[in-house]
Image: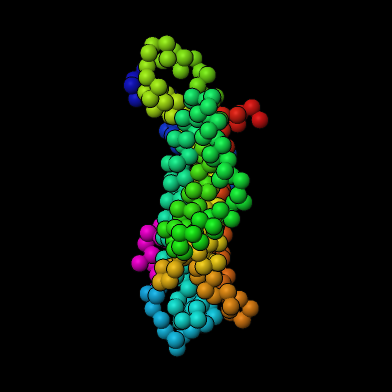
Amino acid sequence: MSIQDVSLSMPSRAPSWRIKALAFASDNKLFVFGALLLLLIILAAVFAPWLAPYEPNKIVFSQKLLAPNWAHWMGTDEFGRDILSRVLYGARTSLIIGVSVTLIAMLIGIPIGLVSGYFGGRVDTLLMRFSDVFLAFPPLLLPIAITAALGSGLANAMLALAVSWFPWYARIMRGAVVRVRSETYIHAARSMGVSHCRILLRHVLPNATTPVIVQGSMDFGYTILAAASLSFIGLGAKPPMIEWGLMAAASRSQLLENPWTVLFPGVAIFVLVLAVNLVGDGLRDVLDPKKGTR
Protein backbone atom coordinates (compact mmCIF):
# COMPACT_ATOMS: atom_id res chain seq x y z
CA MET A 1 0.00 0.00 0.00
CA SER A 2 1.41 3.38 -1.00
CA ILE A 3 1.68 6.43 1.21
CA GLN A 4 -0.98 8.10 -0.91
CA ASP A 5 -3.41 5.24 -0.26
CA VAL A 6 -2.74 5.43 3.47
CA SER A 7 -3.35 9.16 3.53
CA LEU A 8 -6.60 8.74 1.61
CA SER A 9 -7.82 6.01 3.93
CA MET A 10 -7.29 8.15 7.04
CA PRO A 11 -10.38 10.21 7.98
CA SER A 12 -9.87 13.94 7.75
CA ARG A 13 -10.34 15.72 11.02
CA ALA A 14 -11.16 19.35 11.57
CA PRO A 15 -8.78 21.27 13.84
CA SER A 16 -9.58 20.62 17.50
CA TRP A 17 -9.82 24.34 18.28
CA ARG A 18 -12.50 24.75 15.63
CA ILE A 19 -14.54 21.89 17.05
CA LYS A 20 -14.20 23.29 20.56
CA ALA A 21 -15.17 26.77 19.38
CA LEU A 22 -18.29 25.47 17.63
CA ALA A 23 -19.25 23.39 20.66
CA PHE A 24 -18.74 26.38 22.96
CA ALA A 25 -20.83 28.64 20.71
CA SER A 26 -23.57 26.04 20.57
CA ASP A 27 -23.69 25.66 24.36
CA ASN A 28 -23.36 29.38 25.13
CA LYS A 29 -25.46 31.20 22.54
CA LEU A 30 -26.32 34.13 24.82
CA PHE A 31 -22.67 34.60 25.75
CA VAL A 32 -21.66 34.67 22.06
CA PHE A 33 -24.46 37.11 21.28
CA GLY A 34 -23.44 39.37 24.16
CA ALA A 35 -19.76 39.20 23.18
CA LEU A 36 -20.53 40.13 19.56
CA LEU A 37 -22.78 42.98 20.71
CA LEU A 38 -20.10 44.25 23.08
CA LEU A 39 -17.49 43.98 20.32
CA LEU A 40 -19.67 46.11 18.03
CA ILE A 41 -20.03 48.76 20.74
CA ILE A 42 -16.28 48.80 21.35
CA LEU A 43 -15.59 49.13 17.61
CA ALA A 44 -18.16 51.92 17.36
CA ALA A 45 -16.45 53.75 20.22
CA VAL A 46 -12.96 53.30 18.76
CA PHE A 47 -13.94 54.35 15.26
CA ALA A 48 -16.41 57.07 16.32
CA PRO A 49 -14.45 59.87 14.56
CA TRP A 50 -14.88 58.01 11.26
CA LEU A 51 -18.41 56.68 11.85
CA ALA A 52 -20.02 59.83 13.24
CA PRO A 53 -21.67 61.79 10.42
CA TYR A 54 -21.33 65.14 12.23
CA GLU A 55 -19.19 66.87 14.81
CA PRO A 56 -20.82 65.78 18.12
CA ASN A 57 -20.62 69.20 19.81
CA LYS A 58 -21.44 71.33 16.78
CA ILE A 59 -24.40 73.61 17.57
CA VAL A 60 -26.80 74.37 14.71
CA PHE A 61 -29.87 76.15 16.05
CA SER A 62 -31.55 76.08 12.65
CA GLN A 63 -31.75 72.26 12.95
CA LYS A 64 -32.71 71.91 16.61
CA LEU A 65 -35.16 69.21 17.73
CA LEU A 66 -35.45 67.55 14.34
CA ALA A 67 -37.17 64.17 14.40
CA PRO A 68 -35.20 61.17 13.07
CA ASN A 69 -34.77 61.50 9.30
CA TRP A 70 -32.39 60.48 6.52
CA ALA A 71 -29.96 63.29 7.37
CA HIS A 72 -30.07 62.69 11.13
CA TRP A 73 -30.92 59.05 11.83
CA MET A 74 -31.55 59.67 15.54
CA GLY A 75 -32.70 63.27 15.20
CA THR A 76 -31.15 66.31 16.85
CA ASP A 77 -31.28 67.76 20.36
CA GLU A 78 -32.31 71.22 21.58
CA PHE A 79 -29.02 72.70 20.30
CA GLY A 80 -29.23 71.10 16.88
CA ARG A 81 -26.50 68.56 17.63
CA ASP A 82 -26.71 65.21 15.87
CA ILE A 83 -27.75 62.57 18.44
CA LEU A 84 -26.24 59.62 16.52
CA SER A 85 -22.82 61.28 16.55
CA ARG A 86 -23.13 62.00 20.26
CA VAL A 87 -24.21 58.43 21.03
CA LEU A 88 -21.16 57.07 19.19
CA TYR A 89 -18.78 59.36 21.06
CA GLY A 90 -20.61 58.72 24.34
CA ALA A 91 -19.79 55.02 24.07
CA ARG A 92 -16.16 55.92 24.75
CA THR A 93 -17.00 57.61 28.04
CA SER A 94 -19.26 54.79 29.20
CA LEU A 95 -16.67 52.10 28.44
CA ILE A 96 -13.95 54.07 30.22
CA ILE A 97 -16.23 54.44 33.24
CA GLY A 98 -16.98 50.73 33.38
CA VAL A 99 -13.34 49.66 33.07
CA SER A 100 -11.98 52.29 35.46
CA VAL A 101 -14.50 51.79 38.26
CA THR A 102 -14.26 48.00 38.10
CA LEU A 103 -10.45 47.98 38.10
CA ILE A 104 -10.15 50.49 40.95
CA ALA A 105 -12.66 48.54 43.05
CA MET A 106 -10.75 45.32 42.37
CA LEU A 107 -7.40 46.90 43.21
CA ILE A 108 -8.80 47.93 46.59
CA GLY A 109 -10.89 44.86 47.36
CA ILE A 110 -8.59 42.03 46.21
CA PRO A 111 -5.66 42.83 48.58
CA ILE A 112 -8.05 43.27 51.50
CA GLY A 113 -9.77 39.96 50.82
CA LEU A 114 -6.44 38.22 50.15
CA VAL A 115 -4.88 39.24 53.47
CA SER A 116 -8.11 38.74 55.41
CA GLY A 117 -8.78 35.25 54.14
CA TYR A 118 -5.19 34.03 54.43
CA PHE A 119 -4.29 35.19 57.91
CA GLY A 120 -7.75 35.02 59.52
CA GLY A 121 -8.16 35.81 63.21
CA ARG A 122 -8.06 39.44 64.29
CA VAL A 123 -6.78 40.59 60.90
CA ASP A 124 -9.80 38.99 59.25
CA THR A 125 -12.20 40.51 61.77
CA LEU A 126 -10.72 43.99 61.48
CA LEU A 127 -10.66 44.08 57.67
CA MET A 128 -14.14 42.60 57.26
CA ARG A 129 -15.67 45.00 59.78
CA PHE A 130 -13.99 47.83 57.87
CA SER A 131 -15.65 46.58 54.68
CA ASP A 132 -19.00 46.19 56.43
CA VAL A 133 -19.04 49.92 57.16
CA PHE A 134 -19.32 50.60 53.43
CA LEU A 135 -21.82 47.79 52.89
CA ALA A 136 -24.13 49.32 55.48
CA PHE A 137 -25.14 52.05 53.03
CA PRO A 138 -27.63 51.53 50.19
CA PRO A 139 -25.83 50.90 46.87
CA LEU A 140 -26.35 54.33 45.29
CA LEU A 141 -26.62 56.47 48.44
CA LEU A 142 -22.94 56.20 49.35
CA PRO A 143 -21.68 57.29 45.89
CA ILE A 144 -24.10 60.23 45.98
CA ALA A 145 -22.82 61.28 49.42
CA ILE A 146 -19.14 60.91 48.44
CA THR A 147 -19.59 62.77 45.16
CA ALA A 148 -21.53 65.55 46.87
CA ALA A 149 -18.71 65.89 49.43
CA LEU A 150 -15.87 65.83 46.90
CA GLY A 151 -17.67 67.88 44.28
CA SER A 152 -19.54 66.87 41.17
CA GLY A 153 -17.57 65.61 38.21
CA LEU A 154 -16.86 62.38 36.39
CA ALA A 155 -13.56 61.63 38.15
CA ASN A 156 -15.11 62.04 41.61
CA ALA A 157 -18.14 60.00 40.56
CA MET A 158 -15.94 57.12 39.39
CA LEU A 159 -13.91 57.23 42.63
CA ALA A 160 -17.12 57.24 44.69
CA LEU A 161 -18.49 54.24 42.80
CA ALA A 162 -15.22 52.32 43.23
CA VAL A 163 -15.17 53.01 46.98
CA SER A 164 -18.76 51.79 47.32
CA TRP A 165 -18.07 48.66 45.23
CA PHE A 166 -14.79 47.36 46.66
CA PRO A 167 -16.27 45.60 49.76
CA TRP A 168 -18.03 43.09 47.49
CA TYR A 169 -14.73 42.12 45.88
CA ALA A 170 -13.07 41.93 49.29
CA ARG A 171 -15.70 39.50 50.56
CA ILE A 172 -15.68 37.36 47.42
CA MET A 173 -11.88 37.22 47.47
CA ARG A 174 -11.84 36.33 51.16
CA GLY A 175 -14.19 33.40 50.60
CA ALA A 176 -12.07 32.09 47.72
CA VAL A 177 -8.85 32.43 49.74
CA VAL A 178 -10.32 30.61 52.74
CA ARG A 179 -11.08 27.70 50.41
CA VAL A 180 -7.66 27.74 48.73
CA ARG A 181 -5.56 28.06 51.88
CA SER A 182 -6.68 24.61 53.07
CA GLU A 183 -5.31 22.90 49.95
CA THR A 184 -2.44 20.44 50.27
CA TYR A 185 0.00 22.46 48.17
CA ILE A 186 -0.41 25.44 50.51
CA HIS A 187 0.45 23.30 53.53
CA ALA A 188 3.40 21.85 51.62
CA ALA A 189 4.71 25.31 50.80
CA ARG A 190 4.46 26.35 54.43
CA SER A 191 6.27 23.23 55.63
CA MET A 192 9.11 24.02 53.19
CA GLY A 193 9.54 27.44 54.78
CA VAL A 194 8.18 29.49 51.88
CA SER A 195 7.38 33.04 52.99
CA HIS A 196 3.80 34.21 53.39
CA CYS A 197 4.28 36.85 50.71
CA ARG A 198 5.47 34.29 48.17
CA ILE A 199 2.64 31.89 49.01
CA LEU A 200 0.08 34.66 48.62
CA LEU A 201 1.41 35.88 45.28
CA ARG A 202 2.48 32.60 43.67
CA HIS A 203 -0.06 30.10 44.98
CA VAL A 204 -3.11 31.70 46.58
CA LEU A 205 -3.77 34.70 44.34
CA PRO A 206 -3.75 32.88 40.95
CA ASN A 207 -6.10 30.19 42.27
CA ALA A 208 -8.55 32.52 44.00
CA THR A 209 -9.19 35.25 41.44
CA THR A 210 -11.68 33.43 39.18
CA PRO A 211 -14.85 34.35 41.15
CA VAL A 212 -13.62 37.95 41.44
CA ILE A 213 -13.10 38.19 37.67
CA VAL A 214 -16.56 36.79 37.05
CA GLN A 215 -18.10 39.26 39.50
CA GLY A 216 -16.18 42.10 37.89
CA SER A 217 -17.52 41.23 34.45
CA MET A 218 -21.06 41.28 35.81
CA ASP A 219 -20.54 44.53 37.77
CA PHE A 220 -19.17 46.28 34.68
CA GLY A 221 -22.68 46.97 33.42
CA TYR A 222 -23.94 48.09 36.81
CA THR A 223 -21.14 50.63 37.16
CA ILE A 224 -22.07 52.14 33.79
CA LEU A 225 -25.71 52.32 34.87
CA ALA A 226 -24.78 53.85 38.23
CA ALA A 227 -22.52 56.45 36.60
CA ALA A 228 -25.31 57.34 34.19
CA SER A 229 -27.62 57.77 37.19
CA LEU A 230 -25.15 60.12 38.89
CA SER A 231 -24.82 62.13 35.67
CA PHE A 232 -28.61 62.25 35.38
CA ILE A 233 -28.94 63.93 38.78
CA GLY A 234 -26.07 66.33 38.09
CA LEU A 235 -23.26 64.67 40.08
CA GLY A 236 -21.42 62.93 37.26
CA ALA A 237 -20.14 64.08 33.90
CA LYS A 238 -20.40 67.75 33.02
CA PRO A 239 -20.73 69.49 29.62
CA PRO A 240 -19.07 69.56 27.15
CA MET A 241 -18.22 65.94 27.98
CA ILE A 242 -20.41 63.49 26.08
CA GLU A 243 -21.94 60.81 28.30
CA TRP A 244 -25.20 58.93 27.81
CA GLY A 245 -26.62 59.67 31.25
CA LEU A 246 -25.80 63.33 30.86
CA MET A 247 -27.45 63.36 27.42
CA ALA A 248 -30.64 61.91 28.89
CA ALA A 249 -30.58 64.38 31.80
CA ALA A 250 -30.06 67.39 29.54
CA SER A 251 -33.05 66.41 27.40
CA ARG A 252 -35.45 65.23 30.11
CA SER A 253 -37.60 68.32 29.65
CA GLN A 254 -38.14 67.20 26.05
CA LEU A 255 -39.34 63.72 26.98
CA LEU A 256 -43.00 64.20 26.09
CA GLU A 257 -42.70 66.54 23.12
CA ASN A 258 -39.47 65.21 21.58
CA PRO A 259 -38.97 61.72 23.05
CA TRP A 260 -36.11 60.72 20.71
CA THR A 261 -33.76 63.10 22.55
CA VAL A 262 -34.01 60.87 25.65
CA LEU A 263 -34.93 57.57 23.99
CA PHE A 264 -31.73 56.92 22.04
CA PRO A 265 -29.26 57.62 24.89
CA GLY A 266 -31.43 55.42 27.12
CA VAL A 267 -31.46 52.63 24.54
CA ALA A 268 -27.68 52.89 24.22
CA ILE A 269 -27.29 52.42 27.99
CA PHE A 270 -29.69 49.47 27.92
CA VAL A 271 -27.90 47.73 25.04
CA LEU A 272 -24.44 48.13 26.58
CA VAL A 273 -25.56 46.91 30.01
CA LEU A 274 -27.37 43.97 28.38
CA ALA A 275 -24.27 42.99 26.38
CA VAL A 276 -21.99 43.16 29.41
CA ASN A 277 -24.41 41.18 31.58
CA LEU A 278 -24.71 38.45 28.95
CA VAL A 279 -20.92 38.20 28.79
CA GLY A 280 -20.74 38.13 32.59
CA ASP A 281 -23.32 35.36 32.83
CA GLY A 282 -21.43 33.38 30.19
CA LEU A 283 -18.13 33.76 32.02
CA ARG A 284 -19.78 32.65 35.24
CA ASP A 285 -21.10 29.50 33.58
CA VAL A 286 -17.79 28.73 31.87
CA LEU A 287 -15.54 29.37 34.87
CA ASP A 288 -17.88 28.00 37.55
CA PRO A 289 -16.23 24.84 38.90
CA LYS A 290 -19.63 23.50 39.97
CA LYS A 291 -21.14 23.80 36.49
CA GLY A 292 -20.82 20.14 35.79
CA THR A 293 -22.51 19.13 39.04
CA ARG A 294 -25.62 21.25 38.76
Q: What color scheme is it? A: rainbow
Q: Position of residue 276 (x, y in %)?
A: 52, 50
Using the image as rendered, state which of residue 189 and residue 39 is in the foreground. Answer: 189
The answer to whether one can see residue 255 in this image is: yes
Query: Where 102 falls versus 249 (above or below)?
Result: above
Q: Residue furthest right?
A: 294
The answer to whether one can see residue 24 in this image is: no
Using the image as rendered, state which of residue 151 and residue 105 is in the foreground. Answer: 151
The majority secondary structure of the magenta stretch comes to helix
Q: Residue furthest left?
A: 3
Q: Residue furthest bottom?
A: 62
| Residue at (54, 40) in percent of width and height | 131
Query: Where 53 falls versus 142 (above or below)?
Result: below
| Residue at (49, 48) in percent of width and height | 163
Query: Is 34 inside the magenta-drawn segment?
Result: no
Q: Position of residue 195 (x, y in %)?
A: 37, 19
| Residue at (33, 21) in percent of width and height | 3
Q: Position of residue 197 (x, y in %)?
A: 38, 25
Q: Position of residue 215 (x, y in %)?
A: 53, 41
Q: Quadrant of the N terminus?
A: top left
Q: Quadrant of the C terminus?
A: top right
State the extent of the magenta-drawn residues as a range: 43-54
Total marks drawn? Answer: 0
| Residue at (63, 78) in percent of width and height | 256
